[in-house]
Image (cartoon, grey):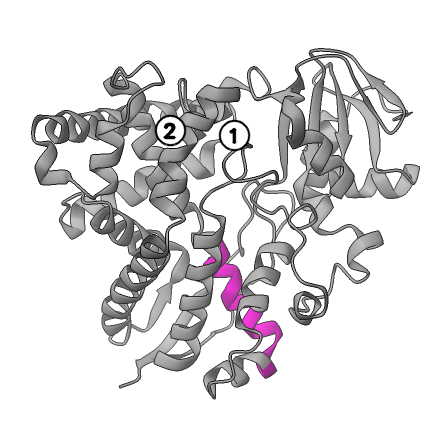
Amino acid sequence: MQKLRSVDSALSFLADGYLLGTRRFDAVQTDAFRTRLLGVPVVVMRGSDACRFFYEQGRFTRSAALPPSITHLLQDVGSVQTLEGADHRDRKHLFVDALMSREALDGLADAVEDEWMSAAADWAHRDRVSLSAEIPKILSRAILSWSGIAATPVGADKRASEFVSMIENAARIGPPNWAARARRRRTEKWAGSLVVVARADPAANEGTVLGAVASKTSRTGAPLPVVVAAVELINVLRPFVAISRFLLFAVLGLRRRPDLAEAFRSGDESLLEDFAQEVRRFYPFFPVIAGRSSRALEFDGHPIAAGSLVMLDLYGTDHDKSYWGDPEVFRPERFAEKGVDPNHLIAQGGGTYLDDHRCPGEPLTVRVIMRVVQILTQRMSYELPSQDLRVSLRTFPAMPESGVLLSGVAVRA
């Protein structure tokens, strides 16, 4: 396996951001290479073979694969993402049942539409609206209501701010990260109090996500510790707010493809799902996923020692020219032509939903993008005033520089 000449790639990671892997894969003409990040040896790989290798047969563990600064903000100790094997599979059922049923897909998409249209009625009276500020509030209100969590608009907006803080500060170091972690601890106390109340009156919360989390037991039959149940409740709520970035990117996608915007507007939705998938593929979300090898392994004839740090390049796989052909072109038609290969389209991770660590919210993400595109093209009109819509690939997580500003919003009857 090719080893990069540079002593350490940490500074290159900061300079190249999401393109760290892609530029080096192209330079060494291979889909895997060795380097160091802050002195730690690491193997970086991309592609469908790498995805299967990374996720299948329990080859890798998430334990100690990511810095605590990231883990504590995005997952925290005891969460489903830190588990492996039978314990992971048992806990994962909670999320699969909560997020992948038809009821969940339809119900949450409807909840987002209701909250969006309510917000749009207010936007119609404002000169300009920042979607980066508004969409997390919409998603927070929708997921809290649908999960059986009572919250005033002000309370839901406060939670949205807390979830955004976790998302935006996970990749930062020093004071911003420390402050966000302190803020998260307060969120966990709030979530823990909900669990305690729900356990005291199970009947009142039956059939809700809150009730499911509160009543979840370990494989031994014991209730999850309150602190762990609180973490898992947040792990339902926060990722839903995180897809706000895909919705911002959907606006940019419509701008790139006015022909499709017009087709959707006229009721031709034949490429609507393909459009949503292309938003997920084309625009940056997670850069990489990391794991440590659980045993001595071999990839493409190259040995990987037990305990080695390996990073699967998600963005690099979604932009692999050898598979996609024209990865830097926003072209939803590609999915109508050859379908969706779950080992090539891995914007939110790979593997299978139940046995591996693949995000169970992925189908929901697609459904919500589709619903919001329908709203943008069929239920409202707007203008994109002069602004900076560039997306820097050096910022984690990436988003349009301006946050996407709308003006002239009008709601259609």
> Is there a contact, CB below 8 Å, between mark 2 and mark 1?
yes
* Disc 2 element: helix
Image point 51% across, 64% down: which residue? 250
| Span of residues in magenta | 246-259
Residue behind mark 2 = 180
Q: Quadrant of residue 44?
A: top right
Q: Is residue 36 above or below residue 300?
A: above
What amino acid does circle 1 point to? Arg
Image point 41% across, 56% down: which residue? 132
- Where is the C terminus found, in terms of image quarters? bottom left
What amino acid does circle 2 point to? Ala
Residue 28 appears at what percent x and percent y? 92, 37
* Disc 1 element: loop
Depth order, front residue of 303/14: 303
Residue 58 appears at what percent x and percent y? 63, 23
Total residue callouts: 2
Name the magenta segment's main secondary structure: helix
Left or right: residue 60 compared with residue 411: right
| Lower position in the chain sequence, tag 2 or tag 1 | 1
Gap between marks 2 and 1, in whole Å? 10 Å
Structural crowding at the residue carrying mark 2, measured as other residues with C-alpha within 10 Å and reported as few (<14), some (14–19) or many (≥20): many
Is residue 164 among what the camera can see?
no
Image point 66% across, 14% down: which residue? 294
Residue 355 appears at what percent x and percent y? 53, 32
In the image, residue 46 lies in the stretch drawn in magenta: no
Left or right: residue 52 compared with residue 130: right
In the image, residue 256 lies in the stretch drawn in magenta: yes
Residue behind mark 1 = 172
Image point 35% across, 79% down: which residue? 379
Depth order, front residue of 7/281: 281
Q: Which mark, by number, is residue 206?
A: none
